[in-house]
Amino acid sequence: MRLGFNLAGIYNSPIFIESFCRYMPKKYLILLAILLIAALTAVAVYFVPAPSQKAGITPPATVFNRSEETAAVEKPCSNEHPDWRQAQVIDGVKIEAAPSCEPDNPYDIAVAVKGTNNVSMQTLMQTHLAQDALTMTDDLDNDGDPDIIRIKLEVVELNGASPDGDFLINTFNIAPGIQPGLWVFAPKSSGMALKNFNSLVANPLLRAPSPVIRVEQGDKVYITLENTHYLPHTIHLHGVDHSWATAGGDDNDGMEEHPVFPGKSHTYEIQPRHAGTMFYHCHVQTAQHYMMGLNGMFIVEENRPDNWVQTFNIGAGQVRHPSVAVQKTYNQEYDLYYQSVDKKLAQIIQNANDPRLIAHRMSREYNMTESFENYFMLNGHSFPYTLRDAVIVANENEDIKLHVANAQRSLVALHIHGHKATITALDGVDQPAGSQVTRDVFDIAPAQRIDLRLRTQNNGLDSYGPGLWMFHDHVPTGTTTDGMEPGGNMAILAYKPMIDEQGMPKMHDALFDQVFNKDYYAKKQAVWGEGDFAPLLGEAGLIPPDYVQIVVFGLAAGLAIGLFIFVLLVYKRKQKL
Ligand SMILES: [Cu+2]
């Protein structure tokens, strides 16, 4: 027996319709029909399908962790790792002292010299390097150093939009409060991309510029790009001796038509016969990807016995384990990497997550021919952060080797105060002794590299004596950060007695208060807003009002309103009469 109530049966039965019509008056029926038609039309209009739909993202409501937001004024040097400054030996690798405020992690250097496969797990754990980031094997020429080098690089986004809410992630400040969106190549890393669970700051391995890579002349080098990014990229080894195709017939020039897509990897094979300071960069949508930061210095060191070169120089700057040939001729070695950023391009990755939107905005909406350079960086930082890790610390009577590369869109006119340096190589080719020009401004075209010999002999030519000598790009924009001076790639050549125990230049306290301040670069603060001259040169301030003007205005306006009301009352009275 069926116990259920059969609704369909009732509605379909002629008795139901008949009784409905009988009890419902005709005019209501028509009204009901009209209402029904109107409602259905509205529904149809609302759901009318379009030929395509716009993609949208609704981020989950994650709360931004503000715990690490700093006050406007920062300590010039955080002095996080004073022990890293000392000369030391790790896993048998001799690491030179680095007096600057933010020296490189010496464990990174030990691994960069010996390879991830030749150091203790204890050493490797002090870095963020993956176990296969850099393997070094096979002394092919029996001269005491490994000759098969396998390097793995990833692509990392800095200061990009978080998919979880309205904040940036993998943050990397180039100057106080300045966080442009960047892409960099980075050695394959392990663990979190951030400093810790409670942080949005990128771990120290993930930073601008892309690492300086050093190999030895004649090494068999395999560079694998493991594309961890959401867009395709390549590695083009600019100026480095490489065949056009790999032994297996694959692309070896990193050209646009051979992109390495997200999640894919590709290995470039080289055995450079020529030593010198070279370059590498992505060659997909080259103009934009290059300006986003996908470029770095590639140095081929001369072949020498027992020559374990420092494969990665993270963040460029001082080379704390120079090659055998450099050690023989020079007291110190530095990599100087100049880079610029167009903030309009950099902002694209801060306003979208969808790779299709980013590709659209970057390649079809953004117009490189109408672009500007707003930020100028030396070794990934703009002044005053250049004082933390891009200082050159010299003693008197030294010969210092400088590798300088220009990854800016515009020319660099490098000027070192108080010194005249000498060009020893151009684009990785040694200059003959007679052509080694000594001068005080070096013009470096985009993508060019120069090697300089900087002498600190106080003889009125090489050096004018000890000091805190500024060095910077003499193109006027180069010393600005979004137009604010002092900024850009300004840095200091400091003679050792003139820096404090934290590696910061002495006698700069007043300047530090002004510039280690994000309000200064946000243009919220007067340039000479502090000190004795503040009343004269600080904010223009407010001028007291003109009281005569106020009284005259009040009287005139009051009278006018009064007169209007009076006329209105008179008119009404007349109408009543
Ligand atoms: Cu690319």
Image (cartoon, helix red, strand yellow):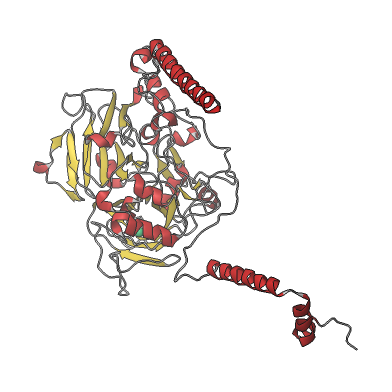
In the rendered view, does 40 fall on the left or right side of 70? Answer: right
Q: Residue at x 41, y 50 (%)?
A: 112
Q: Is residue 11 visible?
A: no
The quadrant of the image that shows the N terminus is bottom right
Quarter of image, ligand 1: bottom left
Farthest-out residue, front: 577
Is 68 located above or below residue 307 in the figure? Answer: above
Farthest-out residue, left: 434
Q: Position of residue 49 (x, y in %)?
A: 50, 71
Q: Residue at x 28, y 62 (%)?
A: 271
Q: Residue at x 38, y 60 (%)?
A: 359
Q: Position of residue 130 (x, y in %)?
A: 49, 56
Is 417 located above or below residue 282 in the figure? Answer: above
Is 534 located above or below residue 144 in the figure? Answer: above
Where residue 260 sits, quadrant-wise, is bottom left
Farthest-out residue, right: 1
Q: Is residue 563 visible?
A: yes
Is 492 located above or below residue 409 in the figure? Answer: above
Q: Position of residue 78 (x, y in %)?
A: 49, 31
- In the image, 338 versus 298, the foreground residue is 338
Q: Position of residue 77 (x, y in %)?
A: 45, 30
The quadrant of the image that shows the C terminus is top right
Q: Count the marks: how many? A: 0
